[in-house]
Image (cartoon, rainbow, N blue to C red):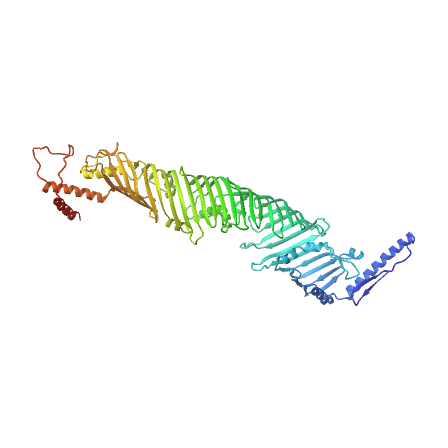
Amino acid sequence: MAIFIDTRNKRLIWLKKHSGNKGAHTLKWLKGFIALVVVLVLVLVGSIAFVILGIDPNSYKPELEKLARQNDIELAIEGDLGWSFYPNLAIHAGATSLAGKAAGIPDIHFEQANFTLDWKALLSRSIRLRAITIDGADIRAESAQEAASVAALPGAAASTQKTATTELPFELAIDQLSLTNSRFTLAAPGTPDRVIEQLNFTSSQLNLDGKAFPIDLTFKTTLPEQPTPLSVALDSALTLQLEDQQVALSNATLSLTGYDKLPLTLNFNARYNGQTDALNLDKIEGQLGSAKIKGMVTGQKLTTAPVLAGELSVNNLILKALPFDAPEGFKKAAIQSGFSVSEQAVKLDNLKLSLDDFSLTGGLSLKLDGVRQLDMTLAGNDLTLPASGEGSTNNGNQAALLTPLLAPLALLEGGKGHVELNLKSITSDNIRLGQLHLNLFTNNNILEITDLSGEVFDGKFKATTKVNLQNKTPRITFTKQLVDIDLHQALTTLAEQSDIRGRLTMDFTGASLGDTQEALMANLAGNGKLNVSNLQVDNINVERGYCEMAALVEKQPLANQSWSESTKLKDLQGNFQWREQKITLPAFTTGLGNLAVSGNGIVNLDQQTYNMLINANLQGDRTSETGCIVKSKRIRNRDIPLRCTGSFAENGEGNCLPDKQFINQLLQEKIKEKLFDQFLKPKADTSQPEATENNQETTPEEPADIKEQVIDTLLKGIFR
């Protein structure tokens, strides 16, 4: 047996000659073994001393770079190579760069690397790396394959490979791996670079025998639109089984910090099976700020067609701590759901969402392949939205609160969808909708609400709507039905002031177009019919206006009596039209006391004014039990027009006066009679008693046509 050094090929040669004396005495064998060990130690020490002191390791650079090129790897050793013998046998490499696109190796540059050899392995006739330490690495990957090569580093370091390039067996099995002060960049085409900085990774006792060994990973990164760096730390025990292709993390702790009010800490176990391409995450427990997190996740076909399923719950989430705008007026939230996510479908089961005292339950399924389809059913209790004051941004936040209900519709891309929502009540700005039900369908960019119903203002409402989104400008048609609505409560809430009381029942059919609320209101047009029971107008008294007009005609002063500041009318019925923010009532009927009332009018929503022509017809000699007595038959049983105008805006006023045109007409008739009696009427027989309005009125003879023409001509001149 002999050992010598081949200085030409720079390798150790081990020669062994076999002895034929197999039956030697035990004592001789023991003495020979001890001598052999002593000789081996002396030879090894001498050989290493010769190599370290007699050979410059930098002379290996050309051969190492050539060997790398033969394996499609570009290697450039810019720094010095060196050895060390004490306290450990190690190889030191200075600044080095390598890349291997064909082999899936990313661009790597490091400032320094140390490779520590295992003395014991050398004594057992093998070369084994005890530790690798790399400092100041800058790794740049341009594909997922290259990134995976970096992620697989611990597994590669734990593998065992033997080579026949030398007579001594060579094992690439690293006990300890350390990466410090490093940087990793994923530069995928078409997307911004994803950078991981201050990357540190350490691991020890690496193996592929299924025995757990510790790993510790920390780094910092910046998320899109988030200037504050996010710090990530992972501490776990890693298990690798090469033959079964299994990787497991046990007692893993993942922490994310960077958001001052929202740190994340997760504890979990994970197992990946490479043969079935399946992932299991269980015993997930953690904390997101003040929120508690629990759940489990399973994954299938991760490298081909990923499918994730599991359960997740987040409780006691403080909304003001979130890094984005949350709905104002709510303090905390909680969510719990089972889920299934794939490239073909998204499904949520047993969904439970709560905002303070409001709770929502239901489920969702979204089909993504082919013609997309959505089916969502939700039910909740009482939801109270915070009131929005002038200049407040609450309206936008309230819209953000309801956005999740409509967000899945945006994913349909012209597909089919169905949303059904039931709420016990929803209150916003003092408007309460009770027993709210929404049934919505969408297909090929046509949205149809087949039922939107509930309770409002002590009555009920029901509406249907169809929105056509196929054109650039959306078009909408709808029907609306109101039943027994409290008018005073409604107008007081909506217009902040109302002089009208009663119970409204209405049917309305309309259409509009536009992509904003203002445009829809401006273009709204429709027809409807209405009925108002127990109608009362607070700021005018129609009966008083009628009596004042009657007193004017009779030339009698109006009796001094107390008049109410309101008018109570019988049921009002009529049709109406809505055009250009004006509501036109071409004909309506109502009444008060012995007055039958009909009329027409216009309500200007833009200017918040009204202009009504009311025809009052007295059927009898008294307007009502508390009204006035009308003696003149000239205005009884005849339509007497009153013009009512006013504003329903804040501090608006109104009045109801006799129509000017009608007054002129009455005066014309009166003057015509006076002129006729004075100049054209034959003198009456003085023997007959004079007729008065208190007695029976006499019917005057009809004047001749020529006389009427003369009088009309005269009156036209006077009143012109």
Task: Give residue 573's position: percent from left, percent from top.
Answer: 32, 39
Task: Give residue 504's position: percent from left, percent from top.
Answer: 36, 38
**Could you say which quadrant of the image residue 532 lies in?**
top left
As drawn, is 669 to the left or to the right of 97?
left
Quarter that holds the N terminus: bottom right
Q: Is residue 409 visible?
A: yes
Task: Give residue 287's position: percent from left, percent from top.
Answer: 59, 45
How many dots with numbers?
0
Q: Is residue 326 visible?
A: no
Task: Give residue 507's position: percent from left, percent from top.
Answer: 37, 41
Q: Nearer the viewer, residue 444 or 85?
A: 444
**Could you say which quadrant of the image residue 7 lies in?**
bottom right
Residue 156 versus residue 679 in the image, above or below: below
As drawn, is 492 to the left or to the right of 633?
right
* Residue at 74 percent of width and 62 percent of height: 83
Q: Nearer the viewer, residue 398 or 85?
A: 398
